[in-house]
Amino acid sequence: MYRLLFLVVFALILVACQPAQEPATDPDEVPEAVEPDEVMIEPNGEPQPEEVIDEMEPHDTDPAPLSVGNRDFALAAFQRLIASDDADDNLLISPHSILSALAMVYAGAEGETRTQMREALRFALDEPALHVSFQALDEALAERAQVEREDDASGFELSVVNRLWGHYDYEFLPEYLELVERHYGAGIERVDFESDPNAARLQINAWVEEQTRERIKDLLPSGSLNEDTRMVLVNAIYFLASWQDAFEQEQTRVETFQRLDGSSVDARFMHRSDRYPAHVGTDTLAVSIPYLGREVSLLALMPASDVDDFEAWLAALNRERFDEIVSGLDGQRVALAFPRFTSDSGFRLARLLRQMGMVDAFSPTEANFERMTGVGPGVMGRSLYVDEVFHKTFIEIDEAGTEAAAATAVVMMRLTAMPVEDEPITLRFDRPFVYAIYDHPTDTILFLGRLLDPSGD
């Protein structure tokens, strides 16, 4: 089989299959491509003619089912990665990047492969509503960059891009290519994986590096592609934003951050007293630090007490608890101390996705991407399966704002009466915490991370 390579930056590699058993179909019998006026997509087994797809527009969809499922996947995947990750490491993923890339793969899946992906990825919507909703979400996120700058030093950039790389003579169904280009903006670029897979790898890595302003390099490691690779799907996210109200550099000073093992490390802490959406609960402290325009924010959460078990608290942070905290944010005067830090992560996600139930997609003999190629499972040299999923992320936070990238949060402060100048609550993020870059109008987790050591040591 051929591999699918995800870049997240997210890369999915599709490879051609070489089954040990006899092929289920005559390998010389190539199914004909579906004609445009025939059935294209079958949600839950019910055919949907093309005219249904043509009639659906992004503004016709309800974003809630997609956003709830996306947050559910984000927290579930995050918990599994933490359980398998080195406990001393900082960790950062982009759930939106991962899901965008996998949604393009899902569009080509059929049978049990499709059913497993739907359940593992928490896709609650049928097609075509699913793909139209992803399109609407990306269009909404693109609007964030239209925020008016207060000066030349401030700005907001959020870029989400998709691209396919396909082997130059491998045939993909035109209906599939039209769907991913229409709803994900993912055009296909033809390369020669068979003759020079390393040249194709370098070309893809160069594109990712360009899209992420050189923050994500070498997404695809040496040897990740070979002569059997037939498609690489890539999603890249780049985020660069100023705070709505910048931290004053003169207020930044070196202070102590306490690690999980009780040891401490020096870190540069930014300070600001202002009104922030905050949550002060019996088990959780949280603050939402808005970026320019207030629709996206950095949401930071930690246990309410420094004697609480951070790992037990984190294990209880599921989607329902996360949503409860976000909905409980309320504008308060806060004396905030927050560390400057830089963090990056890199993952191979195949094992995680298998654990979450997406099994057949990675099987050379069981993977079924017939809606992508017109060829079912087990056809030697033609059927496709997913070989690996690569994900890389980067984030840097300082007094001016945040820069984040993946090659895979703004709770708006409520407008109330003029506030009474009460005593500010003090929130010091000087011990391990979880953070998210969160788009409030769409309830989307763009990035989700854990910081155990701001020094990066």
Image (spheres, rainbow, N blue to C red):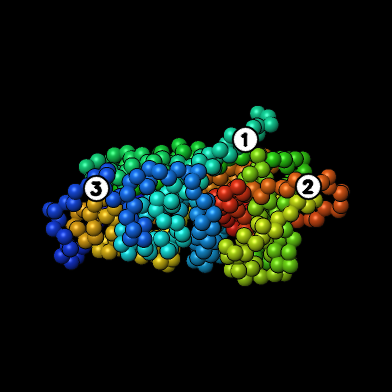
Give how far apart the Cα atoms at labels 2 and 3 are.
57 Å
- Outermost residue on the top side: it is 152
Q: Is residue 275 above or below residue 292?
A: below
Give how far apart the Cα atoms at labels 2 and 1 are.
23 Å
Find residue 91 and report its image quarter.
bottom right
Total numbered badges shown on the rendered structure: 3
Check disc 1 and report the residue beneath it.
147
Residue under the image location 24 percent in, 60 percent down = 377
Amino acid carrying label 3: it is Val
- Asked if residue 42 lies left or right of residue 264, the reply is left
Residue 171 x/y as whole percent: 23, 45
SS class of the residue under badge 1?
A: loop
Q: Is residue 48 visible?
A: yes
**Front-lying residue, 180 or 222:** 180
- Asked if residue 449 lies left or right of residue 335, the reply is left
Residue 338 x/y as whole percent: 71, 51
Amino acid carrying label 2: it is Thr
Residue under the image location 19 percent in, 48 percent down = 32
Residue under the image location 49 percent in, 46 percent down = 60
Give how far apart the Cα atoms at labels 3 and 1 are.
43 Å
**Front-lying residue, 63 or 265:** 63
In which quadrant will I find the C terminus? bottom right
In which quadrant will I find the N terminus? bottom left
Check disc 2 and report the residue beneath it.
416
